[in-house]
Image (cartoon, helix red, strand yellow):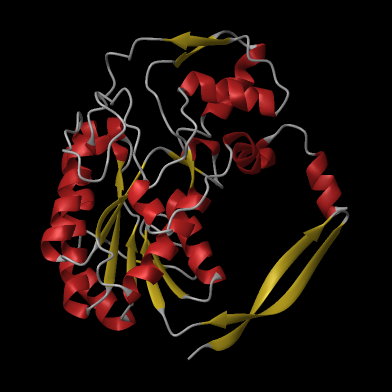
Amino acid sequence: MSRAGAEMRIMFSPGRVQLVQEEVPVSGLRVLVTGATGLLGRAVCREFQTNGWLVIGTGYRRARPRLLHCDLTDEDAIRALLHEHKPDVIIHCAAERRPDVVERHTEAAVNLNVHATSTLAKEAATCGALFLYISTDYVFDGRNPPYGEDDCPNPLNVYGRSKLEGERETLRHCPGALVLRVPVLFGEVESVTESAVTSLWLKVQEAAEESCTLDHCQQRFPTDTRDVAVVCRKLSERARQDPSIRGVFHFSGKEQMTKYEMAVAIAQAFNLPSSHLIPLTEQPAESALRPVNSRLNCSRLELLNLSVEPRPFTSAIVDCLWPFTPDKRWRQTVFH
């Protein structure tokens, strides 16, 4: 049975801002989203909430009002959380996803990426919740793309190994779980440095300073978190109805780009110069090894009609970055 709740929303139109109250339908279904303060977690929360789910979001360092503070490395805290809120679905977005950070702080990263995942999967199985674990294309070595769901993983760095171990713990403790592998993500950011894709904005803006080298070797498939969030919801809803929907799935943007090509595309989208951007065809020696091309084959999702058509990179990146443009005329349009 569904119920309705009142929610205040800010509505923008050219030259006008309104605060309106809307009736928001809430189904009896509850979803727990870990890492709800993060790049993907925020998009997942918004997608489920918009579609009538009751969303319980957790955070840790960046926990804020309307979200629950939870240390996912504390097994007792996880048990108490699930016992109190009794979610129907758990979307596990929380992770240390920066490969170079994982190399330097391996123990802390493994505690979150592997041990916390293991505990969540065990408790999900115990309480009967559907468990969806977000993984990465970095479980592959990038030597023989594209990679299907059943291809043998061979991660090159500690981050990839930790996420692969998280996959194995998920499926070992919760056989009906879902694993969704995705590539590099971007979306609505609180700071441009929050994503490896949007952080290129800083490089694009260095035109007035000096030349800037950017990787032009590793092939990436930048993917909008809004699209990933839709896939998470569709997978969850179908899997609750059909127990055969389980195991590993892939979702990815379709446009193949290096960091250099992404930066040039960003510059062109905002009519900014790109001549200062210099392609670099060798991987920096001090960074963690990364796969050259870990393109994902997403046919399993597509055959089940559970995929979405990825947003074009240019329009999606403009959505993310326009609030950070030096030209603040958009603020005047909205607020005056």
Residue at image point 43% right, 64% down: 234
Hey, which quadrant is residue 328 in on the image? top right
- Please give left or right for residue 60 compared with residue 26 in the image: left
Asked whether, in this view, residue 181 is left or right of residue 115, the answer is: right
**Where does the image place residue 26, in percent across and percent down from the top left?**
53, 82
Tell which of 292 and 108 is nearer to you.
Answer: 292
Q: Residue 29 location in percent, x, y?
A: 41, 80
Q: Is residue 38 visible?
A: no
Q: Residue at x 54, y 41 (%)?
A: 191
**Against 293, is 149 above or below?**
below
In which quadrant of the rendered view does residue 109 lie?
top left
Residue 117 seen in render = yes
Pick out the residue farthest to the left. 172
**Vertical position of residue 336 compared to residue 275: above or below:** below
Residue at left 22%, top 31%? 103
Q: Residue furthest bottom?
A: 1
The answer to whether residue 84 is left or right of residue 62 is left
Q: Is residue 186 left or right of residue 286?
A: right
User: Picture quarter containing residue 288?
Assistant: top left
Q: Position of residue 315 (x, y in %)?
A: 65, 39
In this view, the residue farthest toward the front is 303
Foreground residue among 300 and 226:
300
- Give the answer, above or below, for where 177 lies relative to 1: above
